[in-house]
Amino acid sequence: MRKFCSVFLIACLLASLWTTTTSATTVTITSSTTRGPDWVITEICPDQAGDGTGGWSDGKDCMEFIEIYNNSGTTLNLYDYCLTYNGNARTSEKFETQIVEITPFKPGDYLDGTTMPWSGQSIECGDLSNKPVNPETCLVAPGEIVVLWVMYHEAYYALWNDGKGMSIDDFRNFWNIPEGVKVIAVDGNSNTNYGGHDKNFNVKNSATGTYGIALYSEALNTAANTATGGDANYPVVYTESPELICWATVCFTTQLLAGSIANYSYNFTVDTQGYGAEEFGYVHDLRRMALIYPYSDAKNEATVGRLLPIQKLTLGVPLEAGETCELTDDIYIPEIGKTFLGFEIDGTLYELGSTFTAPAAGVYTLQFKYGDADETTTTTEPPKDTTTAPKETTTEAPEDTSAPSEEDTTTAPPAEEPKKEGCKSAMGLGFVALLVPAALVIAKKKRL
């Protein structure tokens, strides 16, 4: 009997260990490491104004992009993945429960069987001699950034470059992208009148759009890219899916209240502490990006292809000696019912309005600090010297795009009142005063 009990107890212990291992593996798949998922969406820009590049000067959206960062510590093949889209509002039951459309990342001539060049439209297509052709391979090293050019049909117009349309060089020059940063074109031409595929998508500059990186599969492609109609989507609960690597929501109804502004982008980082999830009552998942800098003048400040200092601090990317991070009130502070005290960087608390300077090259840790107002103990002493090695990382108006019928495109406020008055913690009041009038005169494009 004792022998039986011993065997039984050993079997239970082994089962417990197996369960623990299985559970840990699941967590690893779902949330990656404590520093975040393999891919991180770091910047999105849906709205541009021309500056004469290639003859483009009338505000059409030729240069939409999504910037991503290899956070994995290992080399990744971009072509194993795809870009996903869900256009439903935060209050919709379809929010974070389905993938409505995808755009694969792939080499060569990436247009997926569409008819190009189109003819008979009000604006003719160019001769396609400037059409981007992606490299045969796209291996992305740890710590490397890739800029995804989400090409809408306007980039193909014969209006530009003496009938040739926009080129990769035009895109790079417009955004001042550093040499060596990869630019990969993806098919965002969802307007079938202009040679597009109705299940590909452009980046929205109104209402809500959720964009993600997922492992590509034929099942996903068939469900969310080839079929049409209101039920043509890939049903998936984002927080339970091992296929979704990361996702970010651009929301002009609950966060970006000044509206879309041409050439301004929206920066994201990993929601390490879970405050981004807590603000909206979500289940915390490291793969859901948190808004960190809501209105970056991406073109004039030349942020495309580069991480902002605050992104480096939140992602565990090493800073150079003397590199600074201005902790301005433009940084987005989640409202969670507690007083925001400041940013704690390696044990030192910095209030909004202060500047952190790295005394030496290395990795520094930034955390949002909340508590009671009387807990504020900001110090002006320099942070401690740290040279911790990086964590596995090296350094006419635009046309309607025929939005799928299943997309909830409401621009009405959510059921609950937005938690911000104006843009409050998202940016300084003076900046909002400048942004709001500008936003009011912007003609909304594409899907509403």
Image (tube, rainbow, N blue to C red):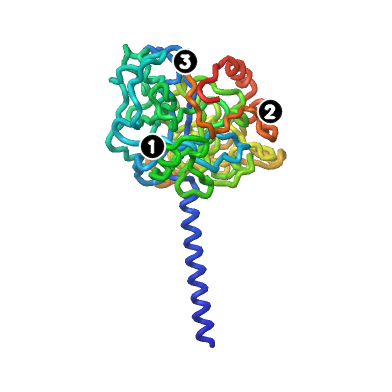
Mark 2 element type: loop
Category of crowding for the residue at label 2, using alpha-carbon neighbours closer than 10 angstroms: few (below 14), some (14–19), many (at least 20): few
The label shown at residue 104 is: 1
Q: Which residue is mark 2?
A: 421
In this view, the mark in front (3 or 1): 1
Category of crowding for the residue at label 1, using alpha-carbon neighbours closer than 10 angstroms: few (below 14), some (14–19), many (at least 20): many
Is 41 placed above or below 304 here? below
Judged from this view, the residue extending furthest toward the bottom is: 1
In this view, the mark in front (2 or 3): 3
Amino acid type of disc 3?
Gly
**Nearest the eye: 9 or 163:** 163
Amino acid type of disc 2?
Glu
Q: Which residue is mark 3?
A: 59
Is 441 placed above or below 42 here? above
Picture coordinates of residue 320 (x, y %)? Answer: 42, 35
Is 416 placed above or below 427 here? below
First along the sequence among labels 3 and 1: 3
Residue 430 visible: yes
State if disc 1 and disc 3 touch (CB < 8 Å): no
Picture coordinates of residue 21 (x, y %)? Answer: 47, 62
> Where, quadrant-wise, is the C terminus in this rendering?
top right
Residue 328 visible: no
What residue is at 68 percent from the left and 28 percent from the top?
421
In the rendered structure, the answer to whether residue 190 lies left or right of residue 448 reads left
Category of crowding for the residue at label 3, using alpha-carbon neighbours closer than 10 angstroms: few (below 14), some (14–19), many (at least 20): some
Q: CA distance from mark 2 to mark 1?
A: 39 Å
**Nearest the eye: 370 or 240:** 240
